[in-house]
Image (cartoon, helix red, strand yellow):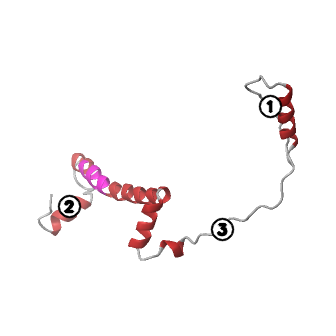
Amino acid sequence: MVAENKAALKQRFTVKWNARWRRVNYDLHNVGDFYLHVLIFLLAVTGLVWTFIWWTNGIYRLLGNDPATVFPSYDLPVVTTTLAPAPVDKVLADLRTKRPTWLMINLSLPVVEVD
């Protein structure tokens, strides 16, 4: 539905607060729905940017940025040291060797409060 003139367009996007209750209720639903659709559109666009790489690249290209310069790729650092196994890992390994037929092991650790 296209508005015929400026007054009709203004009527569709504003609430007439000094009207009867029915008109205010009607305006609140129509005008609120329009502005809610703007919010839903923004949430959908940002959600897609967080979810899909192809959408992110497309949005950045659409806005005039090169995704390769906005998101530079870095090589991951190579870990050269090995970590010593934790005492819990030693206990679980010992249990696996002593009871190989067990399908499940439940290990409860005490809660330690840190000051």
Main SS category, magenta section? helix
Q: Residues within 10 Å of mark 3 (few under 14, many from 20)?
A: few
Task: Point out the stretch of residues depicted in magenta.
Answer: 26-34
Residue 77 in the figure: left or right of residue 99? left
Image x and y of residue 112, in percent: 85, 41
Q: Nearer the viewer, mark 3 or mark 1?
A: 3
Residue 25 lies, with reference to residue 18, above or below; the image says: above
| Residue, disc 1 | 107
Which mark sits nearer the N-terminus, 2 or 3? Answer: 2
Mark 2 packing: few (<14 Cα in 10 Å), some, or many (20+)?
few
* Disc marking residue 64: none
Q: Which residue is mark 3?
A: 75
Q: Amino acid at mark 1?
A: Leu
Q: Name the foreground residue: 113 vs 89.
A: 89
| Residue 27: in magenta span | yes
Residue 7 vertical placement versus 33 (above, below): below
In front of the other: 106 or 95: 95
Identify the residue at horizontal 80%, vertical 26% (top origin). Answer: 100
Closest to the camera, between mark 2 and mark 3, is 3
